[in-house]
Image: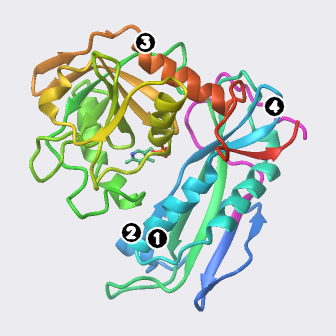
Amino acid sequence: MEKKDIKWGEIGFEYMPTDLRFVSHFKDGAWDDGTLTTDATVTMTECAGVLQYSQSCFEGLKAYTTEDGRIVAFRPDLNAARMADSCRRLEMPVFPEDKFVEAVVSVVKANDGYVPPYGSGATLYIRPYMFGEDAVIGVKPASQYQFRIFCTPVGPYFKGGVKPITIRVCDYDRAAPHGTGNIKAGLNYAMSLFPIMDAHRKGFDENMYLDAATRTKVEETGGANFLFVTKDGKVVTPKSDSILPSITRRSLMYVAKEYLGLETEERPVYFDEVKDFAECGLCGTAAVISPVGCINDHGKEIRFPSGMEKMGPITQKLYDTLTGIQMGRLEAPEGWIKVIEEA
Ligand SMILES: *Cc1c(COP(=O)(O)O)cnc(C)c1O
């Protein structure tokens, strides 16, 4: 493996094509074996299901170099299972979960020169996705699909140190009850673009979405789940059927309980109680945890005691422990680390 000549500390979160990507086609009711290809483009009919009726879903995970020089991915089996759930909800064919993990491994191996070195802060972001490929003009599922995985190196999420962000309570809804909020569908992101740009135009970093039915309970942001810490050190995360089940959040809740000995609760979280929490963070693959310093509710500010300078102490411990597990500095729970290349 020869590392590519990339300034790892300087890259951002942008697409940079790598050498090879995985492609498999679904046709006549079956997936083919799939292959790696150098072709980074997709050509299809103008009437493709994905172009007309947004039949698509995706996943996101990372590979990185551990302290002892191995290349690993974090819990890819959970991405496989979640994508299977997304596919079932969108009438798309499930890509077999074991084959999904094999394909992730093959893509990372084929692009190992793009896996950033340990300590650079950069990682290799892996994007599996699926879409309806053949022509549909009446509203119905496509009959042909592509499952693809590309990867792209991404820089450290927090350049120049972690700074708590300010979010606003959003007047738009992210997900309807019994809708598609709990799957990773592209359509959930299309409709979030206006609210997020609107938030940015008004000086906020993110949107806090409340439950669409009653607007009293905290759901999540456009792309990350919430974690709260109570004043007596309990870690709380909202429970709702319309939240996307973040793998980072589920891992952090496990770490809180099993590594840090903290009490944890997954339960409905009312917006009214948010003002009483000591710490707040957003969790997802990209940042692991982004600390939230301030929530703006139509001009009324909730400022967490952890402040606007750094993460709260428990958020920091959660962050350090999970990234320690990911980077191989701490022993991982059974099955969390998929070794792709030995040192
Ligand atoms: C992907 C995603 C997350 C984060 O999930 P991870 O598995 O932790 O990356 C959270 N919320 C939404 C809406 C998402 O699409």
Comes first in the chain, label 1 or label 3: 1
Comes first in the chain, label 1 or label 4: 4
Residue 160 in the image: state x and y as whole percent. Answer: 54, 13
The kind of residue on which mark 2 rests is Ser
Residue at which label 2 appears: 54
Query: Dot 2: few (<14), some (14–19), or many (≥20) neighbours within 10 Å?
Result: some
Query: Dot 4: few (<14), some (14–19), or many (≥20) neighbours within 10 Å?
Result: few
Which residue range is magenta in the image? 1-22
Closer to the camera in the image, 286 or 20: 286
In front: label 4 or label 2: 2
From the viewer's perspective, tell me whether residue 17 is left or right of residue 38.
Answer: left
Helix, strand or loop: magenta stretch: loop
Q: CA distance from mark 4 to mark 3?
A: 37 Å
**Residue at position x 38%, y 28% from top?**
263
Residue 100 in the image: state x and y as whole percent. Answer: 65, 63
Residue at which label 1 appears: 87
In front: label 1 or label 4: 1
The kind of residue on which mark 3 rests is Pro
